[in-house]
């Protein structure tokens, strides 16, 4: 699958970092429009609320 082939929601890789033990990566990108198929800028648009114990949506879907 090629990301953004039909939607135009693309990512350009700016850099790839490797941790000191070689066990994880940090990939820095420039995001065009939404990264998530649910139309949010990122797939991490939900958070755990410690006070209520609920999962809440943070942010708004990207509008085109």
Image (tube, rainbow, N blue to C red):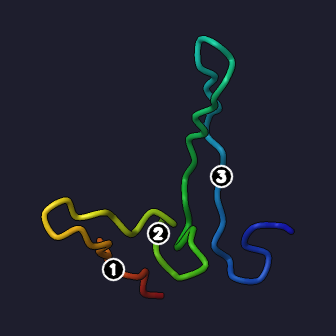
Answer with the quarter of the image where residue 58 lies: bottom left
Marked residue nearer the N-terminal end (1 or 3): 3
Distance from disc 2 to disc 3, alpha carbons, whole Å, reads 14 Å
Instruction: Give above or below for 50 relative to 14.
Output: below
Count residues near mark 1 (Cα–Cα under 10 Å), then give few for <14, some for 14-19, many for 20+.
few
The residue sitting at 30% across, 63% down in the picture is 48
Answer with the quarter of the image where residue 57 lies: bottom left
On the image, numbered disc 1 is attached to which residue?
60
Marked residue nearer the N-terminal end (2 or 3): 3
Between 48 and 34, the one lying in front of the other is: 48
Q: Position of residue 63 (x, y in %)?
A: 42, 87
Q: Position of residue 39 (x, y in %)?
A: 51, 81
User: Given the current orientation, which residue lies at the most extreme left position?
Assistant: 51
Count residues near mark 3 (Cα–Cα under 10 Å), then give few for <14, some for 14-19, many for 20+.
few
Asked whether disc 2 touches disc 3, contact meaning CB atoms under 8 Å apart, the reply is no
The residue sitting at 65% across, 52% down in the picture is 12
The residue sitting at 53% across, 73% down in the picture is 34
On the image, numbered disc 2 is attached to which residue?
41
Between 36 and 34, the one lying in front of the other is: 36
On the image, numbered disc 3 is attached to which residue?
12
Marked residue nearer the N-terminal end (2 or 1): 2
Q: Position of residue 31 (x, y in %)?
A: 55, 60
The residue sitting at 65% across, 32% down in the picture is 16
């Amino acid at each position: 699958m090629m990301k953004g082939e039909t939607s135009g929601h693309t990512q350009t890789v700016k850099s790839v970092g490797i941790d000191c033990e070689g066990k994880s990566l940090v990939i820095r990108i420039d995001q065009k429009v939404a990264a998530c198929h649910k139309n949010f800028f990122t797939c991490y648009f939900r958070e755990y609320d410690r006070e209520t114990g609920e999962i809440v949506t943070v942010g708004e879907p990207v509008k085109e």
